[in-house]
Image (cartoon, helix red, strand yellow):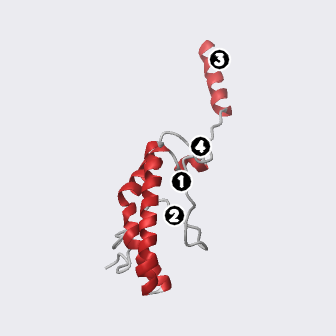
Amino acid sequence: MKKFACFLLAATLAATASADIQDPPGNDYGPTRKLGRGLSNMLFGWSEIVYQPCLIQEREGNNGGAGYGGIRGFGRAFARFGYGFFDVMTFPFPNYNGTYKPPYASNIPWIHGGFQEFPPELGWESRFDYARNGEQ
């Protein structure tokens, strides 16, 4: 009888137990992502020096790319290094509105001055399959 009572209690607890198994929205941003973002910005943020003149040249022509693009690239590279240094030094602590999200303005589509979370990638990106569809 004692075993049956223990089984009944365990079955009742198991049947009425509920757990939140959903992933909270802020779970994508944690201390490890903040550390990785900081290291990426410090090491690869210098790609802005090459990327920005090309981007400005596309939008505003050769003269804009050569003058404004170069200066903007250097400014953004140093800003990325500063943000990266800040992220590396403070990665264990949430500091932007109590979260680990990046403190700088995101790349808003209608404003050309925002930062993406990670530095731009230069060259060919292998994750895109433009030439083949995978079937032969």
The disc, 4 or 1, on the residue closer to the chain's N-terminal end is 4
- Crowding at label 3, few (<14), some or many (≥20) Cα neighbours within 10 Å? few
Q: CA distance from mark 1 to mark 3?
A: 54 Å
The disc, 1 or 3, on the residue closer to the chain's N-terminal end is 3
Q: CA distance from mark 4 to mark 2?
A: 33 Å
The disc, 3 or 4, on the residue closer to the chain's N-terminal end is 3
Find disc 1 in the rendering and name its residue.
102
Find disc 4 in the rendering and name its residue.
21
Helix, strand or loop at mark 3: helix
Find disc 3 in the rendering and name its residue.
5
Name the kind of residue labelled 1 in the image.
Pro
Helix, strand or loop at mark 4: loop
Q: Are marks 2 and 1 in contact (CB under 8 Å)?
A: yes
User: How many numbered badges does the structure rendering display?
Assistant: 4
Find disc 2 in the rendering and name its residue.
115
**In the image, residue 6 above or below residue 73:** above
Helix, strand or loop at mark 1: loop
